[in-house]
Amino acid sequence: MYSIGLTGGIGSGKTRVADLLAQWGAAVVDTDEVAHALTGPQGEAMPALREAFGPGVVDARGALDRAAMREIVFADPAERKRLEAILHPMIARETRRRAERAQGCYLVCVVPLLVESGRWRGRVDRICVVDCDPDTQIARVQARSGLTIDTIRRIMAAQAARAARLAAADDVILNDGATDPAGLQARAKSLHDRWCELAAASGRRRRHP
């Protein structure tokens, strides 16, 4: 299936864009949703995470205590790599499984760390970045999560720089502080229509090599 890698920094609005694309008929696989399932109560990743980081990263429900884990990985890059070594292979397997079952006019893989991982360029046909200025990112994340500005800035610092994401993009959807919902929808719909055309053309080429 023709595939789009959708990414953007925290607070950029990539989930909203993915929801719109799904409404219009795209198949969406969100790696954040996969990660939450793996680290939820009795999630597949929880035994390994408990063994690696101790019971302090497990909450009363048996799920990952994200605040506790953030403190560990932000304090020590080696611990972050250890976390990624556990989670990333599991996320990759489950993402592939969901993608293989997906049905739609094309496939969207929502990957927050797409640029950072360096592994997605060869897995998707196009990369789309939902772009946003840093001040708007901070305001949005604060409004929805209550995280402190310092914590948000640390999360942003661990992600690819805005310029690096834009350099990797085939397509860009601007969703800055001046963008209203109608404007975002119009920008996303324009790309959706284009991707449907590309997916159809790709299907014709595969049938008639």
Image (spheres, helix red, strand yellow):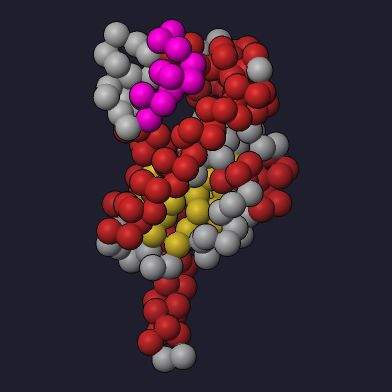
Using the rendered view, name the quadrant where residue 82 is placed: top right
Residue farthest along the bottom direction in this orientation: 208
> Horizontal and vertical percent for residue 155?
60, 23
Q: Is residue 174 visible?
A: no
Query: How would you classify the magenta stretch by its main secondary structure?
Result: helix
Residue nearest the viewer, comparing 173 with 7:
7
Q: Nearer the viewer, residue 30 or 142?
A: 30
Kindly give the residue lying farthest to the front in the view shown: 51
Indicate the quadrant containing the N terminus: top left, top right, bottom left or bottom right. bottom left
23 shown above or below 51 = below
> Percent from the top left, x then y, of residue 136?
58, 27
The number of numbered discs placed on residues in the rendered structure image is 0
Q: Please tell me which residue is depicted at 63% across the width and 41% down the height of the picture.
A: 116
Residue 55, horizontal then vertical, whole percent = 40, 10
Q: Position of residue 137 (x, y in %)?
A: 57, 28
Q: Is residue 92 left or right of residue 159?
A: left
Residue at 53% in and 45% down: 7
Q: Is residue 52 highlighted in magenta?
A: yes
Task: Tell me: residue 19, above or below residue 53.
Answer: below
- In the image, what residue occupies the spot 43% across and 51% down? 109
What's the magenta region? 45-56
* Residue beneath the point at 42% across and 83% down: 206
Image side of residue 199 versus residue 79, left or right: left
Q: Is residue 93 magenta?
A: no
Q: Nearer the viewer, residue 174 or 180?
A: 174
Q: Is residue 119 left or right of residue 164?
A: left
The answer to which of 21 and 53 lies nearer the viewer is 53
| Above or below 19: residue 191 | below
- Vertical position of residue 44 compared to residue 52: above or below: below
